[in-house]
Amino acid sequence: MADLKKDQPKKQIEDLTNRWKRALADYQNLEKRYEKEKADFVQFANSNLILKLLNILGHLEKASEHLKDEGLDLVIVEFKRLLDNEGLEEIDCLGKPFDPEIMEAIEVVKGGEANRVAEVVGKGYLLKGRLLSAAKVKVYKE
């Protein structure tokens, strides 16, 4: 009986030490997750603005197709350079296998290799490796 009482404080100390270590590890993991979420937020905070700028870029590109103006073409090049510097990447999908993770099939067409992109109807973009907007594509069927 005396040995039981003698071991009890040691067990309590060991138990409390283990609990403290787990709580500390949980807190450190929470801190790491918070820092990662904060970094992600900062990194992708401009995504709504970039989507709006992409809409304007699309209009400029349509205008350039019809006007053939050198000044307008230079503006488009600079616009694209600015977006590239922000980590924007156009999804290259024409002729590639259809990938539902980054592409949206809006139509299925005949005539080519099955499940390959036949035509890009709307460009898709990645922002720093994350999908910003899916490419709208036509896909060949079997």
Image: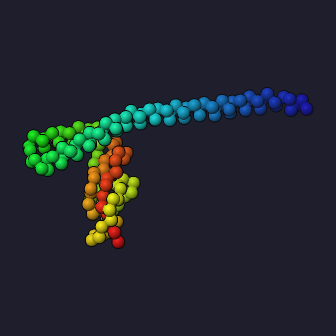
Q: Is residue 131 left or right of residue 77?
A: right
- Give the color scheme: rainbow, by chain, secondary structure or one colour: rainbow
**Could you say which is closer to the camera, residue 135 or residue 43?**
135
Q: Nearer the viewer, residue 95 or 23?
A: 95
Can residue 75 be seen?
yes
Q: Which residue is the extreme one toward the right?
A: 1
Q: Is residue 46 left or right of residue 38?
A: left
Q: Position of residue 97 (x, y in %)?
A: 33, 62
Query: What residue is drawn where x is 69% and y is 30%?
Result: 17
Q: Which residue corresponds to the image point at 81% horizontal and 30% vertical from the top-left?
A: 8
Provide residue 53's location: percent of width, then percent of height.
26, 39
Residue 113: % across, % down: 30, 69
The answer to which quarter of the image holds residue 71 is top left
Q: Quadrant of the C terminus?
A: bottom left
Q: Position of residue 9 (x, y in %)?
A: 79, 27
Is residue 84 in sight in this rendering?
A: no
- Marker count (numbered): 0
